[in-house]
Image (cartoon, helix red, strand yellow):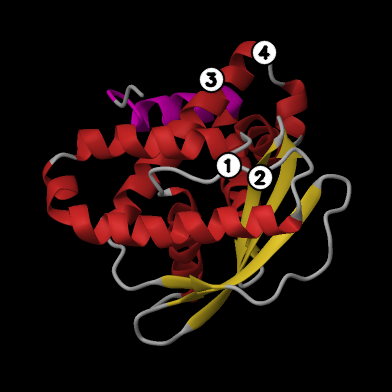
Amino acid sequence: MNMTFNIKKYLILSFFLVFGSVSAPTYSVDLPAEGARDLIKFAAETVISYAKTNRTALQEDPTDLYITVNEIISPHVDFPRVARWILGKHWRKASQEQRLVFQDEFRKLLIRTYAKALLKVSDEKLIYPPLKGSVKNGKYTVRSALVLPDGRKFTVQYRMHNKDQSWKIYDISVEGVSLVSTYRSSFATEIRKVGLDGLLDNLVSKNEGFNI
């Protein structure tokens, strides 16, 4: 199987495992590194249990699944920052309306993708080494490994920062491949072909009827 495909799949799966929990613990304003790691650990363990317990119901009613994923993901992801990084120079040239459309349509794209990933979760799990380093400038990288049912392991890193007195994720990498960089490269290629408005139109078409 193509390794690039695997990496993209595991990026999606790892990201979803983190934010698929029904609830998450809260932490003090100083946001220690332990808080970032514990948030991810708690969410990952919860989503695996949730997926296994509700698999049949989720497969039968994907609408409820999309709503649930949106409610879970959005509060823990810094979508404005992710959108800026993905569009790069195109963000600076974009109008305010284009920025808002991209951010909203990209959020919908992620939610649809992660909702589908939920239905494929089986015995994947995340393991965590001892904490390394400390919080610097309100940022911390949580390191872990994604272990597949067949025993293979992939290094996973979650880049998080302190925003609005809580930890929010703004990128994730599996085996050194960044989720943000992957989308940035893909969208940059599309923009060169059809322009920013063309990219936005394509995203809107893909998400048509997907109102969350």
Residue closest to the far bottom: 151
Tell me if residue 176 comes above or below residue 205 in the rendering.
below
Which mark sits nearer the N-terminus, 1 or 4?
Answer: 4
* Label 4 secondary element: helix
Q: Residues within 10 Å of mark 3 (few under 14, many from 20)?
A: some
Q: Give the label, 2 or 4, closer to the camera.
A: 2
| Magenta stretch in the rendered image | 196-209
Tag shown at residue 101: 3
* Label 3 secondary element: helix
Q: Which residue is mark 1?
A: 187
How far apart in space, not on screen, are marks 1 and 4 (Cα)?
19 Å
Q: Which residue is mark 4?
A: 96
Question: Is there any visible trace of residue 12 in the rendered image?
Answer: no
Question: Is there any visible trace of residue 33 in the rendered image?
Answer: yes
Q: Residue at x 62, y 38 (%)?
A: 192
Q: Quadrant of residue 157?
A: bottom right
Q: Quadrant of residue 2?
A: bottom left
Q: Give the label, 1 or 4, closer to the camera.
A: 4
Q: What amino acid is labelled 3 in the image?
A: Val
Q: Quadrant of residue 108?
A: top left
Which mark sits nearer the N-terminus, 3 or 2?
Answer: 3
How far apart in space, not on screen, are marks 3 and 2 (Cα)?
19 Å
How far apart in space, not on screen, are marks 2 and 1 (Cα)?
17 Å
Q: Residue at x 40, y 78 (%)?
A: 148
Q: What amino acid is labelled 1 in the image?
A: Phe
From the image, which quarter does the C terminus lie in? top left
How far apart in space, not on screen, are marks 2 and 4 (Cα)?
21 Å
Tag shown at residue 170: 2
Q: Residues within 10 Å of mark 1 (few under 14, many from 20)?
A: some
The reply to whether the C-beta atoms of the residues labelled 1 and 4 are less than 8 Å apart is: no
